[in-house]
């Protein structure tokens, strides 16, 4: 069993959504994760990690919903999580065909936001 922690900063314009799925998949390849779990977490204020369909209309609806309740930050924090934990089976995320890992920044502040990816599982030889 191996534990790998990868911290990264992603640029955000504020009030935006960023698909992290390809980034997480690239780390699975880089570290040759065979089977295990991955936790994707953000400690950044007013930022969240969700598993959803990355589809423009769905994100537009989510944005409208968040704008309505944004004044009640505690509700947003309760509805949207800071992390997701996902299985890795045979070198692949087991999240279904249409699901994507999405970083949501509900702040109005542009800049770099932190994302932490933690793998726990079986690995082969790391890729170069």
Image: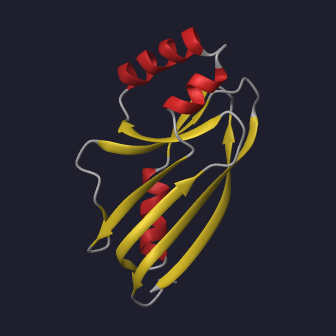
| Front-most of residues 80 and 64 | 80
Q: Is residue 34 above or below residue 98?
A: below
Quadrant in the picture for residue 118? bottom right
Q: Is residue 41 left or right of residue 39?
A: right
Q: Residue furthest bottom?
A: 125
Q: Provide residue 2's location: percent of width, then percent of height.
A: 49, 84
User: Total marks drawn?
Assistant: 0
Tell me which residue sits at (49%, 12%) in the image: 64
Q: Residue furthest left?
A: 97
Q: Is residue 101 above or below residue 106?
A: below
Quadrant for the N terminus, please.
bottom left
Q: How is the image coloured?
A: secondary structure
Q: Is residue 46 above or below residue 2?
A: above
Q: Is residue 30 left or right of residue 47?
A: left
Q: Provide residue 107's location: percent of width, then percent of height.
A: 70, 27
Tell me which residue sits at (45%, 20%) in the image: 62
Q: Provide residue 90's location: percent of width, then percent of height.
A: 26, 74
Quadrant in the picture for residue 33? bottom left
Q: Is residue 1 left or right of residue 43?
A: left
Quadrant in the picture for residue 111? top right
| Front-most of residues 115 and 128 | 115
Q: Is residue 28 left or right of residue 108?
A: left
Tell me which residue sits at (49%, 49%) in the image: 20
Tell me which residue sits at (35%, 29%) in the image: 55
């Amino acid at each position: 069993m191996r534990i790998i922690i990868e911290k990264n900063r992603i640029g955000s314009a504020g009030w935006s959504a960023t698909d992290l799925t390809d980034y997480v998949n690239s780390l699975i390849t880089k570290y040759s994760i065979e089977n295990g779990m991955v936790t994707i977490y953000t400690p950044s204020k007013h930022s969240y990690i969700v598993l959803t369909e990355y589809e423009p209309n769905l994100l537009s609806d989510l944005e409208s919903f968040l704008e309505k309740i944004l004044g009640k930050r505690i509700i947003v924090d309760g509805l949207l999580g800071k992390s997701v934990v996902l299985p890795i089976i045979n070198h692949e995320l087991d999240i279904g065909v249409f699901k994507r890992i999405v970083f949501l920044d509900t702040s109005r502040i542009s800049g770099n936001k932190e994302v932490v990816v933690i793998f726990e599982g079986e690995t082969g030889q790391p890729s170069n």
